[in-house]
Each structure stands twice: as structure tokens, then as C-alpha cells.
Amino acid sequence: GNSVTQMEGPVTLSEEAFLTINCTYTATGYPSLFWYVQYPGEGLQLLLKATKADDKGSNKGFEATYRKETTSFHLEKGSVQVSDSAVYFCALRRYSGGYQKVTFGIGTKLQVIP
Amino acid sequence: NAGVTQTPKFQVLKTGQSMTLQCAQDMNHEYMSWYRQDPGMGLRLIHYSVGAGITDQGEVPNGYNVSRSTTEDFPLRLLSAAPSQTSVYFCASSFRRQGQQETQYFGPGTRLLVL
């Protein structure tokens, strides 16, 4: 079956540090890959996505590249801010009869300290 | 647009009580889903609906019922709450484009504690 693996954290960084959150996946075929962000007390928001191999998703300074050869979709940001403190979920999407089946990772908590 | 709204934000139940978690969206989305979020387990799909009058089970449906009488509303019912249902519940919706379901919009969540 499909699965997504990411570390739970927390990941603690100082402001302006470089961020990497690893995400690897197992899936048949060619899934779409996503990163969602959940700020404290809120629901999940789509951060970025990539729909095919070698695609790079980017938003708000975050980037992730769909690597089919390593089945990975690592999230990176060059300089984190305190406002980036949140939980980050990696997810994959496969379609079955036009309906999407989304598999989420466990979420990685990021804490950025001033 | 209000997007996806959920009520209540927080609820405490005793074992065996029943309740309904409300979810509504004003974006005319065909697809709606219920997830539960538990520590160390990410989000798991409970039930989903592909349109008014059509629902189906997700990954963890036991103990939950749903119905979809209108496009806007997708309530989740717990008929007899159990401590194992203590969780944070998220509702999500999405539209269809070119025959496929697009990216989901999530509500703010309902935190449920079953004693």
C-alpha cells in the first residue's frame, strides 16, 4: 500500500537557519506529492505540491523537488523565521476512479527560536 | 467565502454519549471528507462524500456515521462515544476539475475528549 515517512520532531532551529525536513514515500505508479502546514490551533493549509517527477514546488520561500529515483520530496527553506513555527505534513495523492486517496505522514513539528 | 467551517471547536463527552460534529462549506465543492488526527499517526480518513446523497467509508470508519443531504453540509455522527475516539477531527472539501478531484481545503478542526 501507499505510505509516507517523515520524522516527528520537534525540529528546533534558530531564526535564519537552513531547514530540511525529509519525506520519503512508497506508492505504486506516479502519485502527486504535497506539503501541508498546520499553524497552532488551525487546520491544514496546502504549502506546495508537485505532480510529476523532477517537478519543484515552491511557496513562501519553501521548496521541494519530486525525486522519483529516491522516492523523496524533502522540504527546504534557506532562512526560517519564527512565524514558520508549525507542524508540516508530507502527503501523497493517488486517484481511484476519479476520487483522490490521500496518505499523510505523521507530521514534523518545527520550532524556530529568535 | 467563509471556506470550510466546523463546530464545535471543542467538546467533552462521556463514554456512551452521542454527538454530531458539524461541517459546512460555501464553495460549492462536490467532495467532502472527515479525518481524525492523532499523535504519531498523521491524518486518517474516516468517511468521504463525492456529492449530495453519496458517501463512502475511509480508512477508519468504525463508530462513525455520515450523511450528505446537501452540497454544503457533511455532519459526522458518533452514536456511542468511546475514549478511543478522543482526537482532533478535520473536515475537508474540494472540487472536481476535468474529472478529477482537486486539492483539499481544511476546516479549523474540532477537538474531542471522551472521558
Image (tube, rainbow, N blue to C red):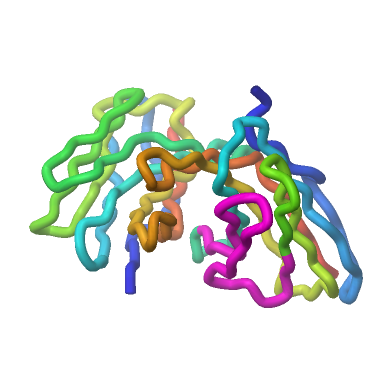
Report the side of A5 relative to A102 (left or right).
left
Front position in the image: A78 or B26 = B26
Quarter of the image with the C terminus of chain A in it: top left
Report the side of B14 relative to B47 (left or right).
right
Q: Position of residue B87 (x, y in %)?
A: 68, 61
Task: Indicate whether residue B46 is drawn in magenta.
Answer: yes
Quarter of the image with the N terminus of chain A in it: bottom left
Front position in the image: A103 or B56 = B56
Q: Residue at x 59, y 53 (%)?
A: B33
Report the side of A24 relative to A8 (left or right).
left
Task: Indicate whether residue A27 is drawn in magenta.
Answer: no
Query: Furthest residue to the left?
Result: A69
Instruction: Tell me which corner region of the image, top left, top right, bottom left or bottom right, holds residue A12.
Output: top left
User: Is A61 located above or below residue A67 in the figure?
Assistant: above
Q: Residue at x 33, y 62 (%)?
A: A5
Q: Residue at x 60, y 50 (%)?
A: B51
Instruction: Tell me which corner region of the image, top left, top right, bottom left or bottom right, holds residue B76.
Output: bottom right
Front position in the image: B88 or A28 = A28
Q: Position of residue B90 (x, y in %)?
A: 63, 50
User: Is A77 located above or below residue B86 in the figure?
Assistant: above
Front position in the image: A58 or A109 = A58
Report the side of A92 relative to B109 (left or right).
left
Count all numbered tags in the image, as a single digit: 0
> What type of secondary structure mainly makes up the magenta span?
strand
Magenta residue span: B43-65
User: Is A93 located above or below residue B7 in the figure?
Assistant: below
User: Is B87 located above or below residue B73 in the figure?
Assistant: below
Q: Position of residue A8 (x, y in %)?
A: 42, 57
Q: Residue at x 33, y 58 (%)?
A: A94
